[in-house]
Image: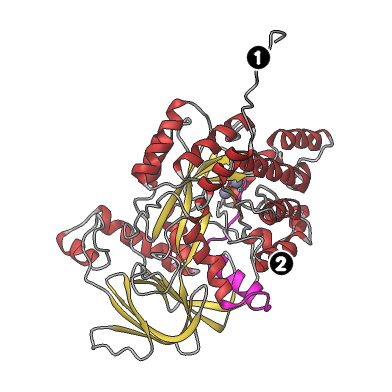
Amino acid sequence: MALRPLDLFFFILSLFLLFPSPSLSDSATQFCSAGSEYGEVPSTRILIKGGTVVNAHHQQLADVYVEDGIIVAVQPNIKVGDEVTVLDATGKFVMPGGIDPHTHLAMEFMGTETIDDFFSGQAAALAGGTTMHIDFVIPVNGNLVAGFEAYENKSRNSCMDYGFHMAITKWDEDVSRDMEKLVKEKGINSFKFFLAYKGSLMVTDDLLLEGLKRCKSLGALAMVHAENGDAVFEGQKRMIELGITGPEGHALSRPPVLEGEATARAIRLARFVNTPLYVVHVMSVDAMDEIAKARKSGQKVIGEPVVSGLILDDHWLWDPDFTIASKYVMSPPIRPVGHGKALQEALSTGILQLVGTDHCTFNSTQKALGLDDFRKIPNGVNGLEERMHLIWDTMVGSGQISATDFVRITSTECARIFNIYPRKGAILAGSDADIIILNPNSSYVISSKSHHSRSDTNVYEGRKGKGKVEVTIAGGRIGWENEELKVVPGSGKYVEMPPFSYLFDGIEKSDANYLSSLRAPVKRVRTEAT
Ligand code: URP
Ligand code: ZN
Ligand code: ZN
């Protein structure tokens, strides 16, 4: 197989890093970021001229000046000297880089490991205008600290900024203690509970309750994968008994009603504990309706649809070609026609708040692990490189949302929820220089032949769109320009995320109101009869 330019670049770079001769290592440091283990890099000064600068609440014609990884000024007609790289953004949008709240890079799952690691996944992200992502750490045999350390190792080659959520897969004193350690010492402010994947990651309601209470006390956000894992198990048995072993059995075994049930249950338990809840990968109207109801009642529930659920429908799972059908297997499943459009509407009206990808990519060889049994097809689809383009084209291009809305749902809201705004998610003086330049008149075609993921397939194969990210600046460095990646392993930073985001405002007061509403314990006078 011929090496693509990016593969060749990775190969040469890894030779530099593995066998650094004095002259080679000198030149390698030219590419490296300040503070990385590979060396120091000169300061970067960039002026973006003449674009429309878009934030979540406002857009204006302005220049943006960047120095040493930080936005220094946002105003019209900034004058600079010759040593500054000038990018002309006339007629284009200058926006905060995307933040993907939901990825799985180098994740060991269903007997294999996702094909994109922190380097290839992030390189793909930069090519698509995403400059930060939050990945899910999976504990090692239930141990959170061991899981965190494993992910510290996995992420050493990062070429853009990233943060971590932590999954909780069992409950005991050690887990409870380690949650506190991770929040207070390691910058984790969210924990995910899987209500599906019986026999591996799934937790039961008693564990979820303990976890919700602990999250509340730490100011950490509880996240749920909401499907009824026991019922899914039953549904899978039913399909096998009917002789349905192919990818369509995946969708048939876990219908929307099981997502609606688990979403409602998690929402009610979070309400009982009085702590905020974040529902990941909302794929169905059934789940979305539960979130809408809860939010209308004043409950703090965040709903995250993912690009695949917004854009695709489930007919692919019936494709006679296993390689095609299996690439669409993810959980909860991609739903029949109608769900995606309803989720788009919910996103545009504020019922759902931000868009993720659930980037969890397996190549066709890995997917073939389930050739004879859909239960063994590794669950997951791509999207990290495609998210920004597809949301722009589908939602801004169709007039469903504005450019400012686009910034809010792809970047700013994520930064606010995970408490890193305005360092991230904004084009403001003092913010990190994570910036994209998007040309609304430029077109693209998505293909596994030209994408930057390591997978040999793409669930958006052949899809055409308008509105293309022409430049991505991450941490003040140009990482994508002229259709070329300029990425450096080790240049990405781990972003610590503090607890007690805005979602926790008012919790103490509502707890106090609850206690004073109880009219209990009632003081009873004991008579002789009692
Ligand atoms: O199919 C999926 N979603 N794979 C990744 C694991 C998860 O449930 O988020
Ligand atoms: Zn999940
Ligand atoms: Zn996921």
Residue at the limit of the structure toward the top, as seen here: 528
**Mark 1, other Cα within 10 Å: few <14 / some 14–19 / many ≥20:** few
Residue position for label 2: 345
Rendering quarter of residue 16 = bottom left
Q: Nearer the viewer, residue 377 or 62?
A: 62
Answer above or below: position of 18 versus 351: above
Query: Within the magenta stretch, is there residue 102?
Result: no
Q: Which residues are magenta?
A: 379-403
- Specify whether residue 5 is in view: yes
* Residue drawn at (58%, 43%) of the image: 274
Amino acid type shown at disc 2: Glu
Q: Nearer the viewer, residue 288 or 252?
A: 288
* Residue drawn at (21%, 71%) of the image: 42
Amino acid type shown at disc 1: Arg
Residue at the limit of the structure toward the right, as seen here: 242
Answer above or below: position of 400 versus 302: below
Foreground label between 1 and 2? 1
Residue 287: image location, x then y, percent = 71, 51
Residue position for label 1: 526
**Mark 2, other Cα within 10 Å: few <14 / some 14–19 / many ≥20:** some
